Image: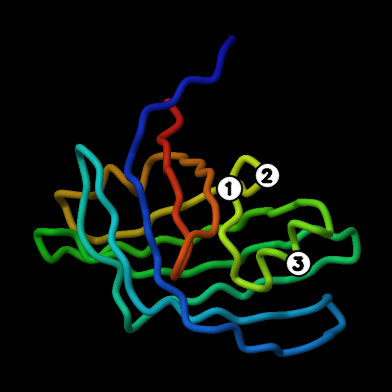
Amino acid sequence: MTLQSRPLFRLFMTLQPALELGQTPAGGRRIFSVSGGYFEGERLKGEVSPLIGSDLLLARADGTFQQDVRLLLVADDSDLILMTYRGIRRSTAAVDERLARGEAVDASEYYLRTTPWFETAAPRHAWLNQIVAVAQGGRCPGGVEYDVFEIL
């Protein structure tokens, strides 16, 4: 059996500078506030709300970074969709340093994958409550960008 998918949308989020929480019992914690963005696909498009959105990034002891993200998507019909995801970013120490400095690093130089989930009360978008999605992405000037896929 082969896993199949179809594109759901491309997501771009603008980020505020990181707040360094420091070394906690769970690991090194950084918090990124999401200040906006957009998403666009054949079946779904709109804006990322600048009011609700954050990534509680955790630097783990094994050298990987774990995302824990909550976003409010505002569809082009004004319906609200909560998007949450967890994910992993791993790379070499040199790439981590370049990313930390805000340099442009091609997404092929590191691994960034997430598992988005959606929650909405909007009848038009209720199908999102019943799918599994995956995303691959990377940092880009001013934020982060993901290609999100519905798993069939």
Percent across and percent down for residue 108 are 62, 40
- Separation (CA) of disc 3 from disc 2: 13 Å
Using the numbered discs, state the Cα–Cα distance from disc 1 to disc 3 in whole angstroms. 14 Å
Tell me: residue 46, above or below residue 17: above
Residue 67 place in picture, x, y as percent: 63, 63
- Quadrant the C terminus occupies: top left
In the rendered view, how is the structure colored? rainbow
Q: Residues within 10 Å of mark 3 (few under 14, many from 20)?
A: few
Q: Which residue is mark 3?
A: 97
Q: Type of residue at label 3?
A: Glu
Classify the position of the N terminus by image quarter. Answer: top right
Write the residue at 48% across / 51% down.
116
Q: Is residue 26 left or right of residue 71?
A: right
Label 2 close to label 1 by CB (< 8 Å): yes
Q: Is residue 41 above or below residue 78?
A: above
Mark with earlier residue (1, 3): 3
The extreme right residue here reads: 61
| Mark toward the start of the polypeptide (3 vs 2) | 3
Q: Tell me which amino acid carries mark 1.
A: Asp
Q: On the image, numbered disc 1 is attached to which residue? A: 106
Residue ID at (54%, 59%): 139
User: Separation of disc 2 and disc 1 at Cα?
Assistant: 6 Å
Q: Determine which of the numbered discs, if any, sits on residue 83 in the image.
A: none
Residue of label 2: 109
